[in-house]
Image (cartoon, coloured by chain):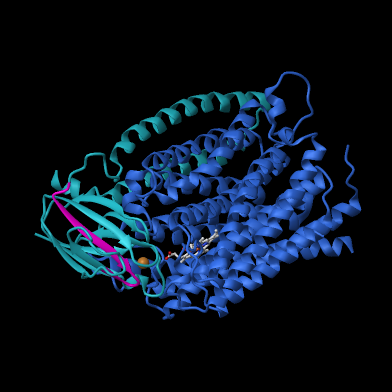
Chain colours: A cyan, B blue
Amino acid sequence: MSSITILMTLQNLAGILTLAGATIVVAVVIFVLLSASEEEDKDTAKHKVYAVRTKYFAILTLVLVAGLIISLRLVPYPRAGSVADETVTIVGVQWFWRMGNGEMTTGPVEFVGSNEVTVPSQKNIKFVVTSADVNHGFGIYDSKGSLLTQTQAMPQYKNLLYYKFDNPGEYYVVCMEYCGQTHSYMVGKIHVQ
Amino acid sequence: MSTIDQVEKKKERKLVLTWAVTFLIVFPLLIILGLFMRLNQGRVVELDYTQFYAFMTMHGLGMAGVLFSIAFAGLWYLISTRITKLNLGVGYFVYVLVLLGFLGLAYGTMIGNFAAGWYMLYPLPFKGASWAVSSTQISSVSLIVMGVAWLVGILHLLYALAKRYGGFFNLLGWQYLRKGEHEKLPALVLVATIALVPGIFAFLVGAVMLIMFLLQSFEPTLSFDPLLLKNMTFFFGHMLVNITLYCGVGWVYGLLPEFTKREWKVDKVVVYSWNATFFFIIFAYLHHLYMDFAQPTSVQYLGQIFSYGSAIPATAVTMFGVIAQVYHSKMKWTIFPLTVLFGMMGWAIGGFAAIVDTTIAFNTGLHNTLWVPAHFHTYMLMGIVLFIFGFLFYLFSGEEGIHQENKLGKVGFWLFVVGAYGFLTMFYLSGINGVPRRFADYQGIEAGQVKEIGAQLARYAAMFIYVVLLGLLVMYWSLFTKLLKRKEASA
Ligand code: HEM
Ligand SMILES: [Cu+2]
């Protein structure tokens, strides 16, 4: 069971779904390729295709509505009444992270922090994320290299990201929004105890 | 009914051939920039950062520009030779301005090192930039010039169509929703209208945004709201790419019936679905801002709803429409219908991957990973670009020649398709493995194996890009022999 949940990262699920979708599309394309060789008058052919279309339309609509109902419950946005056990301030600066425990008391430009921060596991952490200059992206990876969650770090705005680390260990911060020259080296670390 | 004489058609043909040849020159050059990006990410070559991001900026903006140009030029040609006369002077005006804008952009990026990316998020061009302010200015002006050119072209085209069909709303097919007699509206015209009207909004918003950039470049104390600018950026960027695809779909509606010998009629379902598409085109851009938690949550929900909605008309009406055209039609799979069918396939697969990514819950784990370039390269490279090559074969072979077997063209086509899907697979696998997009290289990432996987997949991707280029070469060979033969025949 646990191996299944490990394999089933969000990204793997996306990959499997898309592979399934692509397989169906390719099957339809092959069917269409082969179907052209036969001859039938236009109206009969059209009626057959449209009969399938009606069913397809009904199924697609159902699937999309179901997809919306299920997935819109799983959004990463803060809910009204979300409570945090601990607050961490995150400021993106070209090209490093300033992070620190607790709420920020200065402006983002003056904020002093480090590119490593320590937080407890099994606790609801509130990340207050902003930027001192341009747009950055605050992405958290686990030690296996899975991207767990993210939010944009935007100047003049504070994005609130609530996250609970299930297990202690090393987590990595990677900048997820292109912010200039050394964007690809804008990394940090979160030690979860 | 037809007031378009042969002389006029010849002139329009010359215009579209000018566009086509320009496209054929620029397209592989932009691919080579992509090749260098992947080689750098795979540690095979070493570019400096500024150079990498300047390549990235030129590749992204250049591709978006050149594809929209040819998509628009194709619509212009079909409409001006089949539906209603268009002003050639305006046609060349658009061409010259777009070319100038393109050259200016190439200068700004490749020489001036402007490297803010294809979507240049404010205030990036002004803070910590490794390029001169003048490069930002040259690039912005160049983009404005292109936008103005397209705006003029679109307005002229829509005006001519509205005049021909007795009013703008008839172009949207609204007469089909009323009782009573009315003139038939070609599907080509309906789709062209739905594709181009949002273009007006896109280019206006894009121009306003770039003018704001210019103002700030002259007056550094100015400051704008970054969230507003981000909304404007994606409103413009998303729409440009989206309508490029729909322009290509317009040709499919217009040309496929010549191969299946089945008329593609506009009816109520088609009208409803394309009018709905209009709104999807305008509001789907919101999915680019999912990770901006400062955006109101209700707007985020709307983004997902509109994005999901766009799948309905695209598949149930257009793709089923293609199937109804082809099914049991005793049609031969010559090069043109083949590009249409595979173009639809790329659109569907890329669209499916897009629907996954436009699910907010998934977006948390996929946003700004290589999954994003993966899906949009699928419906650009394996969607619209295939439609474009189909159209070019149509154009270069002539209305009779296109129905003949073209073995060489098909060999090129298959190489291109196989190479492209290989290249795309590496993007998808990278996205699944958490490799971020817009990274000059992955050496800085310590988490897991992301660094190694990212570089390895980039090297594999580069090998597939060579196959893509080989396929292109073969298709070019076939295209130009067709063109020369026609020239000889008519001489
Ligand atoms: C074989 C053909 C192509 C190759 C090899 C290629 C390669 C690439 C690569 C390597 C990137 C950078 C990905 C990253 O690390 O973020 C990229 C980005 C991009 N490509 Fe392509 N591409 C191709 C075709 C196209 C086409 C047909 C379009 C049409 C719209 C396109 C538009 C873009 C855009 C808009 C970006 C994003 C640039 C940015 O992030 O600023 N590409 N491409
Ligand atoms: Cu960054």
Task: Indicate the position of residue B394 as horizontal and vertical percent values.
Answer: 72, 53
Residue at 52% from the left image edge and 47% from the top image edge: B347
> Viewed as shown, does residue B251 lie left or right of A171?
right
> Viewed as shown, does residue A78 lie left or right of A154?
left
Residue at 78% from the left image edge and 57% from the top image edge: B91
In magenta segment, residue B358: no
Which quarter of the figure has residue A185? Answer: bottom left
Magenta region? A84-97
Task: Indicate the position of residue B283 as horizontal and vertical percent values.
Answer: 51, 42
Residue A135, above or below A122: below
Residue at 42% from the left image edge and 77% from the top image edge: B49
Furthest-top residue in view? B179
Residue at 45% from the left image edge and 69% from the top image edge: B462
- Provide the major secondary structure of the magenta segment: strand
In magenta segment, residue A87: yes
Task: Indicate the position of residue A153 as horizontal and vertical percent values.
Answer: 34, 59
Depth check, front residue: B57 or A114: A114
